[in-house]
Image (spheres, coloured by chain):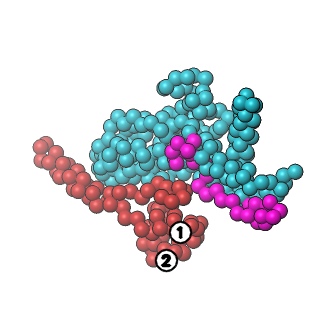
Amino acid sequence: MLIPIRCFTCGSLIADRYEEFTKRVKEGEEPGKVLDSMGIKRYCCRRMLLSNVDIIDRVLSYYEVLAERRAEYDLEQY
Amino acid sequence: MVKLQIIEQDEKEIKVIFKDIHRSYVNAIRRFAICEVPTIAIDEVVVLENSSVMYDELIAHRLGLIPLKTDLTRYSLPEECDCKSALGCTKCRVLLVLDVEAGNRTRVVYSGDLRSEDDFVKPTSDSIPIVKLAPKQAIKLEAYARLGKGKEHAKWQPATVSVLTPVSEEEDTYMLYIESLGSLPSSEILSKATEILYKKLLEFAEKSKSVM
């Protein structure tokens, strides 16, 4: 769902770097070099960031639409 | 005489060379750095409200894995605390509260949103995402953190990497490398691990005397 908090293998904290990592990769930087510059050296931690897909975003889009519809419905009532 | 030489040291990492020491002792220190030195982590969570898309258990698990800054002088293990209560006291338990509601926009709940009753015991990083909330969703919970050991659950490990490499085995020289998670400084992990080893050896000597 969301990025795991710790690396599955070594247990070091990785979740706090994920937003910076995705932002920089989206801006066109090379993922490997971004990881190097952030000081993530071991390949167990690197794969955590490289291979993650935030599925929660796909689930949340349904709830966003639901909230919109509810707001529209409430407007109609008054 | 055992000789110690610190090669590299900062908050996070420490590299030490041990000379004239048997491998079993340095290896014990290495293992204790992982599973015997206690740290504070969230252990019990009371969920008051959760309308997010994640299950209560999943959020509780994520909260448990957040490393918290630990003060070993003020806190003691619940089994060694003098309060002897299952609920704990101010010396063995820390309360953290999370109360977030998303407005009209999707919002990420970060570890920085956790409010601790102790100003020192806080998440080491304020930017760890815990959950994402869609508009109007809310989360409200009480989390109780306590001291624990890595052998009980990996969330209490103070060190992520703790490796022993032989420099020269004939002369009994080894290099110990410890990488801290941030809850304790690397030097404190090393000194605490040595202290625990010393205590355990004394205990063992005491017990073996009574057998003989």
The answer to whether residue A75 of the structure is visible from this angle is no
Task: Name the element at disc 2.
Answer: loop
Q: Which one is nearer the viewer's eye here, B146 or A62?
A: B146
Q: What is the chain identity of the residue bearing mark 1?
A: A
Which mark's residue is nearer the viewer, 2 or 1?
1
Tell which chain the image draws in red.
Answer: A
Q: Nearer the viewer, residue B160 or B208?
A: B208
Q: Mark 2 sits on what residue?
A: A30
Asked if residue B196 lies left or right of residue A23, the reply is right
Amino acid type, callout 1: Tyr
- Looking at the rendered structure, the kind of residue marked 2 is Glu
Which labelled disc corresponds to residue A8?
A: none
The quarter holding residue A54 reads: bottom left
Q: Where residue B91 sits in the image (x, y, percent)?
A: 59, 28
Residue B27 vs residue B79: left or right? right
Q: Position of residue A18 (x, y in %)?
A: 47, 62
- The stretch of residues the image draws in magenta is B149-175
Say whether residue B162 is magenta: yes
Disc 2 is attached to a residue of which chain?
A: A
| Residue at the image point whose x is 51% and y is 60% from the top | A9
- The C terminus of chain B appears in which quarter of the rendering? top right
Which class describes the residues within 10 Å of circle 1: few (<14), some (14-19), or many (20+)? Answer: few
Secondary structure category for the residue under label 1: helix
Which residue is the site of mark 1? Answer: A43
Residue B207 vs residue A40, the one in the foreground:
B207
Left or right, B46 with respect to B152, comes to left
Q: Name the residue: 28% across, 46% down.
A: B136
**Residue furthest to the right:** B1
In the picture, one chain is cyan; tell me its letter: B
